[in-house]
Amino acid sequence: MATSSLARAQSQAMTSETGTKGVGGEPTVGTATSTVTPRKNPGVRLSDEAVLHAGISASVGYDSNVFFNDANKVTSPILEVTPVADLTNGDRGGGRSPEIYYDLRGGLVYREYLTDDPNTKAQRAFNPSAGATLETNRDTVVGFALNDSFIRQQEAPYLPSTSTITRDSNLATARLRLAPGGGRLATSLQYSNSVQIFEDKALEYGNSMGHEGVFDVTYKWLPKTALFLEVAQGLITYLNEAQAAANNRHKSYPFKTLLGLRGLISAKVALNAAVGYAAANYQDAKSPSGVGNIAGGADLNYAATALTALGLGYKHEFQNSPIIGDYYDANAAYVTLRQSIVGRLILSMNVRYELRTYHGVVVNGSGVDRQDHLVSAGAVLDYFIQPWLFLGASYGLSLNRVDQSAGAPADYTKHLAYFRLGVGY
């Protein structure tokens, strides 16, 4: 049933600031990202330029709430196997990038629940991902960049069932950059196309496509610090028009303009901050207004030492919502910490809180607002026995509290704990 996906079947979040996997709009908890990549393993050189990096990890753990439902908790041991591969001509030692840089990457998260319960066992997941990047060296006067990312995400529904929520998401971007006169003044023009497809027929009304054009002007008033102005115009349409209309889905034209600063403000502190105006014309539906028209945020990163990094962030914006209501206002704050100890022990921690206010949720024929309080937290500890071999442990928390549930169970607290063994070269 469609209501089984209400909290997680959202439009954005192929990634999130917290580093936990995002399935839909909010970050949910899975095997936290391995810290194997900072080791900069040499890989297998296939030619003078091409280097292949590959790895695989196996995780055994425990899921405290498989179906994201506090009223009917189901627990289970869990197994995940995650192979990854990356083919690139980039210099991972910090040297100058090649004139034309490319990176091809792919991965898979295979998840198995170690239980005899048929509903839980049916939540077996097969989540492949793939991506590609092609771009010119950033030092060139005229440059371009092409990127594409795909991910398939399977998650359990809100109620015990043999069905799963499966969403396919693809994001493609093309950017043209012009930086004459040494790059002090630079402009770029970018086009993005996003597609999301729900494989569950009950959710096909949420299948959507987004288009966005972005114009960016950057002025470097210091060697590593720049002021920027960004203007973006988008279009979001639903692929199944009849089903979308029957479920109160509306085409929209989101617009945003931001003025901000990005770069270093000292040798150890980097700041990305912006504030601006956002709007969206929703056809036959209420559009964002008031504080919903304010967009902005800041990311502050402090490199205390070469081995310690701290990040703080806040974001205020609205996002289109393909399943719950029309859109939601989001206020999110997050903290990240990364600590390396003698190069072999790496600790990563994160905490994020987000308040979402969904607008246009239809209950008994009337539109109401719904507020979700989302908390996610995680910690990952990896010990490198060799540069290519590591042992790890991770813990993740995902929590949601809903002020207005729109007739569906929505409150949950989910804990995931893993032990991991992996290799990467």
Image (cartoon, helix red, strand yellow):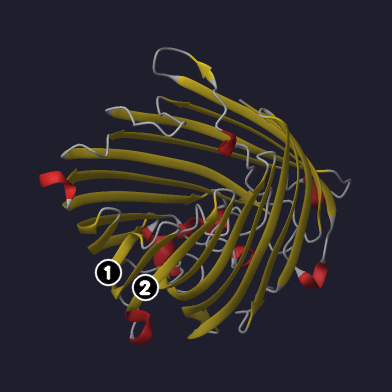
Give the vertical position of 282 relative to 145 (above or below): below
Contact, CB < 8 Å: mark 1 with mark 2? yes
- Picture coordinates of residue 231 (x, y %)? 22, 64
- Picture coordinates of residue 32 (x, y %)? 66, 49
Left/right placement of residue 358 relative to residue 415 reads left
Left/right placement of residue 61 relative to residue 225 reads right
The mark tally for this picture is 2
Which quarter of the figure is the C terminus placed in? top right
Q: Earlier in the sequence, mark 1 or mark 2?
A: 1
Residue 244 placement: quadrant: bottom left
Secondary element type, mark 1: strand
In-front residue for pair 43/78: 43
User: Looking at the picture, which amino acid does disc 1 mark?
Assistant: Leu
**Residue 330 visible in the displayed image:** yes
> Could you classify mark 1 by the number of other residues whose Cα lies within 10 Å: few (under 14), some (14-19), or many (20 or more)?
many
Give the vertical position of 251 relative to 199 (above or below): below
Residue 404 placement: quadrant: bottom right
Secondary element type, mark 2: strand
**Residue 160 visible in the displayed image:** no
> Could you classify mark 2 by the number of other residues whose Cα lies within 10 Å: few (under 14), some (14-19), or many (20 or more)?
many
**Label drawn at residue 258:** 1
**How far is the residue under mark 1 from the one under mark 2?**
7 Å
- Picture coordinates of residue 5 (x, y %)? 61, 63
Left/right placement of residue 48 relative to residue 391 reads left
The residue at the point 40 percent across, 13 percent down is: 48
Residue at the disc numbered 2: 296
- Picture coordinates of residue 44 (x, y %)? 54, 17
The residue at the point 40 percent across, 73 percent down is: 317
The residue at the point 87 percent across, 46 percent down is: 115
